[in-house]
Amino acid sequence: MTQIFAVHGWAGHAEQWTYWRRLMEQRQWPVQVMERGYGNNAPTQPSWTNEAGPRVVIAHSLGLHFLPSPLLQEATALVLLGCFTAFVPEGRNGRSTQAGLKGMRAALGSEGERSMLERFFQRAIQPLSPGACPPSPLLKGLSSEGRKRLHDDLVLLETCRTLPRGWPSDARVLVIQGEQDAVVHPRSHQQLLDQLGSQVERVHRGPDWGHALITTEVWELVERWIESL
């Protein structure tokens, strides 16, 4: 039995996997979805069952760094959507990215909080049209605990440098990246590939894809790869 564990990234939420989840369940692939708990939904932390078969993690962006070590180390395959080891690249681009993260942290809890989140979601959706994704529930308001998690996870974005603890060095890996990604710098995408080395089974870069990779087109690619496990 193929088990799937999906985890969203910074300012994400479990509902963004709804369409993919429906398709996975049609294939009789049990799927559990992590909820970080930025908004009004309580955090959730799924776990593997004892059933034999592939254990697949599908992580989007910073979600790769949210995975607890015991769960991650038992994964047999990983799909990395717009992920990275270091979000802040070296050099001038890194200094600009770091300044942007500090500005986002300063906006949390201020009058500029909503506009900061709106700008981030707009960058994440590019080059798709603004109406291609439903409005984030976070724009309706953050819980105090959720705001603290967003702050702490911005710090994580600034400081992450390597593959997370518990990384399964024998797992099969599919990396999917968007060449139009306006959130993750190309150098950060490349650094992930450099650190993974020969462990990457396949890399797919969509020339017209951005950071919002949980789409029908990407799912068709992911589905075929999971079928091959």
Image: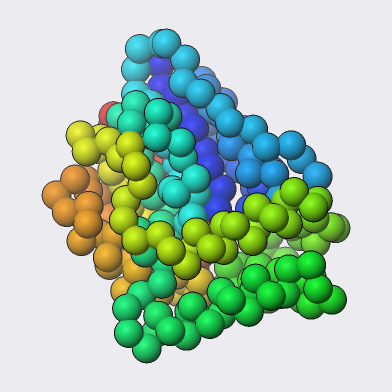
Answer with the quarter of the image where residue 33 lies: top right
Image position, residue 78 (x, y; %): 35, 40
Q: Which residue is painted at 27% across and 36% down in the image?
A: 168
Decide: is 124 above or below 167.
below
Image position, residue 121 (x, y; %): 66, 68
Would residue 182 be visible to someone looking at this image?
yes
Q: Is residue 45 left or right of residue 148?
A: left
Q: Which residue is painted at 49% across and 32% down in the image?
A: 5
Answer with the quarter of the image where residue 76 lies: top left
Image position, residue 140 (x, y; %): 85, 58
Q: Assign the C terminus to one quadrant of the image.
A: top left
Colour theme: rainbow
Q: Which residue is painted at 81% across and 51% down in the image?
A: 143
Image position, residue 199 (x, y; %): 19, 45
Decide: is 46 above or below 178.
above
Q: Is residue 193 left or right of residue 44?
A: left
Q: For the view shown, which residue lies furthest in the left direction?
A: 198
Q: Is residue 25 left or right of residue 92?
A: right
Q: Nearer the viewer, residue 180 or 91?
A: 91
Would residue 215 be visible to someone looking at this image?
no
Q: Nearer the viewer, residue 90 or 7?
A: 90
Answer with the quarter of the image where residue 147 lies: bottom right
Decide: is 96 above or below 18.
below
Q: Which residue is painted at 33% across and 31% down in the image?
A: 73
- Report the label total: 0
Q: Assign the N terminus to one quadrant of the image.
A: top left
Q: Is residue 208 left or right of residue 202?
A: right
